[in-house]
Amino acid sequence: MSNFAFLFLNAIKKYKTISFRLFLIVSLFLSPISGISQNTKTKLDSIVKELGIKDKASLILLKDKAESEKKLREEEYLNYQKVQKQNKLFNLIEFEIQNAKFLLTKGFNYKDVAGEIHQLKDWEEFAIKGIDGKKIRVLTDQNLSSTSILLDELLKRSTDRLQKISLENHQLSRTQEKIDSLVAQKNLYYVPTDSVSREIYRLQSERTSTDVTLISERLKNAVDSIQTLEIMGDRLKYKIESDIIENDRLRKLELDQLFTKKVPVFERLQMDINPFATSIRTNYLVMHFYLINNKNSILTMLLLIIGTAIYFRLQKGKFLHLGFKKELLVDINILNSPIAAAFLVVSNIYQFVLPMPPLIFSIILWTASTISLTIMIQHTLRKFVWNITIFIFVLNLLAFFDIIILIHFVGESFLILVINILGIAIGIYSFINRAQVRRKVYLWYIVAGAILQFFSFYYLVNGHYNLGKFLMTRAVYSIIVIFSLYYALVIVKEINLVAKILKTIDEDSPKKPLKGSSHKFRFGFYVLLFVSCFLLMVRNTFTFQNILDPFKNAISETRTIGNISFTFENIILFIFIILLSSFISKVVSFLAADNQVIKNKDRAKTIGSWMFLSRITIVTLGVLAAFASTGIPLDRITLIISALGVGIGFGMQSLVNNLISGLIIAFEKPVNLNDIIEVGTQSGKMKSIGIRSSVVTTYDGADVVIPNGDLLNQNLTNWTLGSNHRRSQIRFGVAYGTDLELTKKILYEILTKNKNILMKPKPSIWFTQFGDNSIDLVVMYWIKHFDFDYEVKSQLIMAIDKTLKENKIVIPFAQQDIHIIKDIEPEN
C-alpha cells in the first residue's frame, strides 16, 4: 500500500494537469475501498502501466532524495571547513599574543634605555665643554684630541643603542601588524550552524577579543614609548655628529695656526669650569672607554707578559741549576730581572699591535716601561748614568702630570717652563760629562731631547701654547721610548744568545760571568728605531690620523672575488695569528728539548708528551682562531679540508703518516723524553718529540732527526721505557788450575762494594765452558740507571783486574801451540 501511495505521489509531480491530478487523488483515497473491488484496482494498474509512470516516479524520487542529501552534506562540509579555519585563526592569534607578551616582558627596560640616552647626553654636554670658546679662550690640542675620542665613542654607543631600539620597534610593530591582519580575516567571524560549535565559538571569540584588546593597547603604548626613545636617540646622534664636525674644524684650525696663533699663556683667565677636575674626568672617560672596547687585546698583552716572564724565569732556573750564581748572570737582562724584562719587551713590541690607544694610555704604558727598564739595568749602570736615569724618570713624572691637564691655566704654563729648564739642564750636564757615558748613542738622544726642550721654551714664552706643549711632551717621551725600544730589541737578541749558551755549555766546567748581548747594531737598526719612535710620537696627532684614516678604510673595505668576500685587515690578522701560534709552539718545543727542561728525569718523561700535545693544541687553536677572526664560516672550512683531502691522500702521504705517528707517540707513549733508544742503526737519547719528526742525540753528540713514522715502522728498542734499570755483563776467563770457588767469592765481593749495582735482582756469576786457553765465565749484574753502564763496567774491570792479581789468579792470554814436523827424505 505504501508503495502504491509513493507511486501516486510521483505521478502527481510528473503530470501537472489539474484533471489528471484530481483523478489520481481520488483513486488514491478510494484505493482501500477499491481493494475490495477488483475492478477498480485493475483499472489503476492498467493506467499506470499504460503511462509508464512507475519507473519514472521511482527515478524522480531517488534523484530528489540524493539532491537533498548532497545539499545537506555540502553544508556540513563547508561548515566544518570554516570551523577548522576559524580554529586555526584563533590559534594563530593566541600564538602572536603570547609572542607579544614575551617581547613585552623579556627585559626591554624603557627606564634603563632612557637613562642610557640621558647619560650619553650628559657625557656629550661634558665633552663639548672643552671646546666651547665662550667658556675657554685657549683651546688645547690635547683637549681637542681627547674630545674627539669621547665624541667618537659616544657616536658609536648612540648608534648601537639606536639599532637595538629600532630592532625592538620593528619586532613589536611587526607583531601588532600580524595580530591586526589575523583579526581582520572574515573566516574569524563565521558563526557555526551546529549548536555545540556555536557555543565554543562564542567562548573563543569573547576570550580572544579581550586578549587582543589588552595586548593591542600594551603594544601601542610600548611602540609609542620606543618611538619616543628613538626620536631622543636620533636627536642625540645628530647632535654628536655636529659636535664631531665642529671639533674636527677646530683641530684643523689649530693645526693651520700652530706657528702663527698666539694666546695669553701667562694671563690669568676667568673660567666657569675647574680645569683640573674636568681634565681628570675626561682622562678617566677616555681610559674607561678604551679599556672596555679593547679588553681582549689588553688581556692578550697581559697573558703574553706573564708567559714571557715564566719563560725567562725558567731560563734563569736552568742556569742556577747548572751551578751559576746570581752575580754571574747580571749582564744578561732576561736572567737578571725576568719579570721586568718580560714586561719591557712585550709592552714595547705589542703597542704597535694595540688599536690606536689614546695618548694617556700610551703615557701610562711608557711610564711602566721606564720603571721596568730602571729595575732591569740598575745593577749594570755607572753612578753617573744612574743619576741621569733618575733625573729622566723624575722628568717623566712631571711630564705625565702635565699631560693629564687638558685645559690650560697659568700654573700649567709655569710647570711646562720648569720641565723645559730641567730638560735643558740634563742635556747640558750630560754633554759636559760625556766622557762618562760608555754608549754615545744614549748621549745624543739626551742632547736631542734638550734641544727640543729649548724650542718648547722659546715657543711657549712667545705665546704658542700648543706647539710648546707638544714639543715638551715629545722631548721627554721620545727619550723614554727610544731607550725602551732599544732595550726591547736587545732583549730579543738575548733570547737567541741564551739558547746558544745552553746548547754549548759544559756542566762540569768552572762557571764564569756570562757576557750579555752586544750593543753594536747596524745602521738600519737605528733607522728602524727612529721611524718606530717617530710613529709613536705623532700617531695621536690630527695630521697623522687624517693620513691613516684612508689607509684604514682601504684595508677594512670589503672586496669580492666571485662568491668570496674578504678584507686586507682580516688577511693581516689571519697571518698574524698563525705566526703567533707558530711562535708559541716553537717556544714550547724549545722548553721540551733536552737540557731545556728541569733536570728531573722522571718528571721529564711525563712532561714530554704533554708538551707535544700542547704544541698540537696551540697550532690547532691558532688555525681555528685565525679562520674565526676572518669571519670564514666553519662549513666553508670543512669544504676546504674536504677539497684538500684528495691532495693530502696522494701527495702528502709521508707527511700525514708522520703527523699521525706523532699523535700515536703522544698518546701511546712508546718513547718519552730522555729515553735511551735504538732505531735501525741509530742509538742515543731522545731529545725532543715534534709534530712531524723527533730528535735523538747520539753518544757522539750529533742530533739525528728521525721522522715519527720511522719510529713506529722500524724496530724500536727502548732501554728505559719500563724502568731505568739495565742488565749488563762482563766476560773473561781464568787459567786452568785456578780455584774457581775462590774466584767466584772474590767477584761477589767486588760486585757488592759498587753502589750502582743492584742486589735485587741478585748478580750472577756463571762458568760457561772450558775454553782453548781458559775456563770461561760471565758476570751478570743490574745497574740503577742506563746512563751508568759504561762507568760501572769500567770500575768493575779495574777492580777485577786488581783483585785477581792480588790473589794470584791469572787471566791467561790467548795462545796456540804450533808443532813443526820436519819431512825426512826416503832412502833410494
Image (spheres, rainbow, N blue to C red):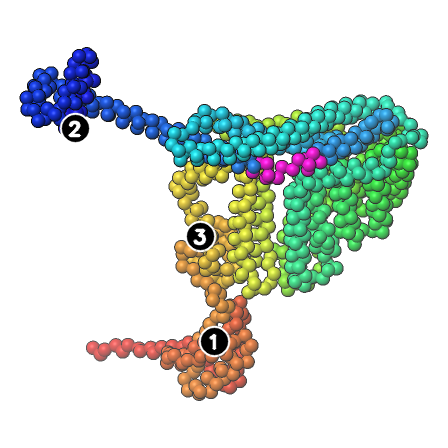
Give the image location of residue 697, x and y in percent.
Answer: 52, 58
Task: Give the position of the C terminus as an image quadrant.
Answer: bottom left
Residue 55 locus on image (x, y percent): 13, 21
> Which residue is disc 1 drawn over?
781
Q: What stretch is highlighted in magenta?
A: 102-115
Q: Are marks 3 and 1 in contact (CB under 8 Å)?
A: no
Q: What is the CA distance from the residue labelled 3 to the residue labelled 1? A: 36 Å
Q: Which of marks 2 and 1 is nearer the N terminus?
A: 2
- SS class, disc 1: strand
- Residue 626 disc label: none
Q: At x 64% / y 32%, what residue is drawn?
A: 160
Residue 111 is a magenta residue: yes
Instruction: Choose between 282 and 412: the one closer to the eye.
Output: 282
The mark found on residue 661 in the picture is 3
Q: How far apart are marks 2 and 1 (CA)?
A: 127 Å
The three-letter amino acid code for the residue at tag 3 is Ser
For mark 2, what is the residue?
2
Residue type at mark 1?
Answer: Tyr
**Residue at 53% over, 37% down:** 98
Give the quarter of the figure containing the N terminus.
top left
